[in-house]
Image (spheres, rainbow, N blue to C red):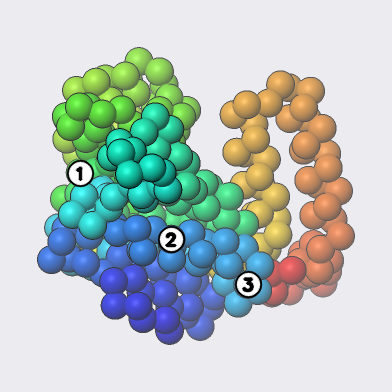
Amino acid sequence: MSDDQDLLWEIDEVGVAWLTLNRPDAANAITPDQRNRTIELMEGASNDLNVRCVVVTAAGERHFCTGADLRVSRIPENPGPADKPDKALGDVGRNIKRGAQRLVASIMDCEKPVIAAVNGTAAGIGAHIAFASDLVIAADNAKFIEVFVRRGITPDGGGAYMLPRLVGLQKAKELIYFGRDVTADEAERIGLVNKVVPQAELRATAREWATQLAESPTKALMLSKWLLNRSMESSRGAAFEDEAWAQEMASYTQDFQEGVAAFKERRDVRYRGW
């Protein structure tokens, strides 16, 4: 178990890695250090054969992540002459690319399935951490808020990319333009959430789903995730070509051989993840 106080990382006996934002007194607002560490852990999970699935959650029962912690987040100071401005054109965009966008991409690109177990309010980049995950389970008190326009800024961390693909263009505009609170039940109804459960059942439900995925053929899940993510921007011809090659690659894995053997021998299958 890795314990950096503000960010907890634990891999359980079945290969589920639990990443927990651990700043409940700060509404689990994410700091640059937490963000960078999360990116490292997500990237590391891809090639760690001990990890078969990742669950992202947070401490407490009120807040999943209320966005970037503006008290500690700042744009890095760039070299320049003594009379340089506090902020030059390009500084903000560069900061977003290196920060929020890398965080969201690390979740979307992780080669293991990622489940968000949303235990409370998810606002701004906190909501986008959930939306970038493969599956989202929300406690019944959870809320999702596109808070950016409320603050006079535009969405970052992939929000304007992900939302239309999840809920359609018109609904995405509604959520971003008004920045209103979206309850867990509404989020489930419009397709932002897979399942809503009572707060007391959230961790057990996430564990049940994650364990099932951890016991599945990991490389087949990896290739399926790759196919599904690419399909949102592919032509039919490209998607069919990808599908054929994904099946080709999967057929060389040991888990494929095990699945076929278990079927022929009429026994329980035991996938190892490679």
The local secondary structure at tag 1 comes to: strand
Q: Nearer the viewer, mark 2 or mark 1?
A: 2
CA distance for labels 1 and 3: 33 Å
Q: The N terminus lies in which quarter of the figure? A: bottom left
**Residue for badge 1:** 143
Categorize mark 2 by other alpha carbons within 10 Å: few (<14), some (14-19), many (20+): some
Check whether the beta carbons of the residues at disc 2 and disc 1 lie within 8 A of each other. no
Identify which residue is drawn at 16% across, 58% down.
27
- Kindly identify the residue that appears in the image at 51 percent across and 64 percent down: 40
Q: In the current view of this chain or complex, which residue is farthest to the front?
A: 82
In the image: residue 207, left or right of residue 48? left
Earlier-in-chain disc, 2 versus 1: 2
Q: Which circle, 1 or 3, is nearer the viewer? A: 3
Q: Position of residue 52 (x, y in %)?
A: 58, 68
Does residue 195 lie above or below 215 as drawn? above
What is the spatial separation of the Cα atoms under label 2 and label 1, in whole angstroms?
Answer: 25 Å
Q: Which residue is mark 2?
A: 36
Read off the residue under disc 3. Answer: 48
Could you tell me if residue 212 is visible in this image? no
Q: Position of residue 262 (x, y in %)?
A: 78, 70
